[in-house]
Amino acid sequence: MAGFSGIVLFIVSFYATVNFYRMYSDSRKIIHFCLGTTAVFLAIIGISDLLATFFPILDPNFIDEWASVFSVSFLLSAAAALIRDFKPVFSRFPRGLTFLPLTLILIYPLILDTVVVKLWAVALYQGSALFISLMIFGYKANQNSAYGYVLVGVLFFLVTFVLFWLPRSLFTMPVYAWELLTACGILIITVGYNYVNNIEDDMLDHQKSRETWFI
């Protein structure tokens, strides 16, 4: 079952990767690039066992650990880009600062042997990205119900986050459950984001057509 759920996670993540990279090629928005890159490493996590099967020299635990570090780093960078895009143009911070969370990749080797510290670092990154997404998409969903689709996907991630980090004395999440819940969250967010993006593009085209009409 865990192998099947990993393949599902890979397929959904691959779809998200292609989708957000396509968006990035059109918009050049940092958030699209970061979301696409996050999906790349989630896809790697999904097939880490298969990679180790075909290439015995690879350690699936090593792949999972470092793919998780890269994915949460780019996920928090996407959240930072979300904050930047949410602000008015005149008050936005420099684009380069959205990549500040990637410093975790550089410092992670220094905390590699400290189990508790590295787990807390990953959990902090995940929780921060979820908190930011809930606040912004919750506000946007209140203004425009179309954003509710994205908000539902974020809530899937929140449930997964809470269940995953519960003490093992209370609850232990099977690997297949984590992978399937994550895949559901990715799929809902990707489809919802496409829906919202298409609505915004239609509104922008409509506004441009009106401006052109009155010239």
Image: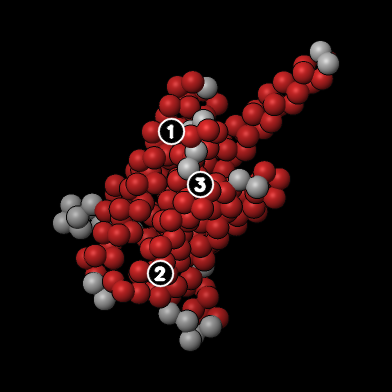
Q: Looking at this view, is 100 or 185 the one in front?
A: 100
Which of the two labelled residues, at mark 3 and mark 1, occupies the earlier sequence position?
A: 3
Q: In the image, is residue 39 above or below residue 59?
A: above
Which label was assigned to residue 106?
2
Helix, strand or loop at label 2? It is helix
Mark 1, residue position: 136
Residue 206 as seen in the image, left or right of residue 154: right
State the residue at coordinates (28%, 65%): 118
Circle nearer the N terminus (1, 2) = 2
Whichever of callouts 2 and 3 sits on the residue coming sooner in the sequence is 3
Cα distance between the residues tagged 2 and 3: 21 Å
Find the distance from the CA under tag 3 to the CA under tag 1.
20 Å
- The quadrant of the rendering that contains the N terminus is bottom left
Q: Residue furthest bottom?
A: 57
Examine the image and state in which quarter residue 60 appears. bottom left
Mark 1 to mark 2: distance in Å? 28 Å
Which residue is identified by label 3? 94
Instruction: Classify residue 215 as left or right of residue 188.
Output: right
Identify the image quadrant of residue 136: top left
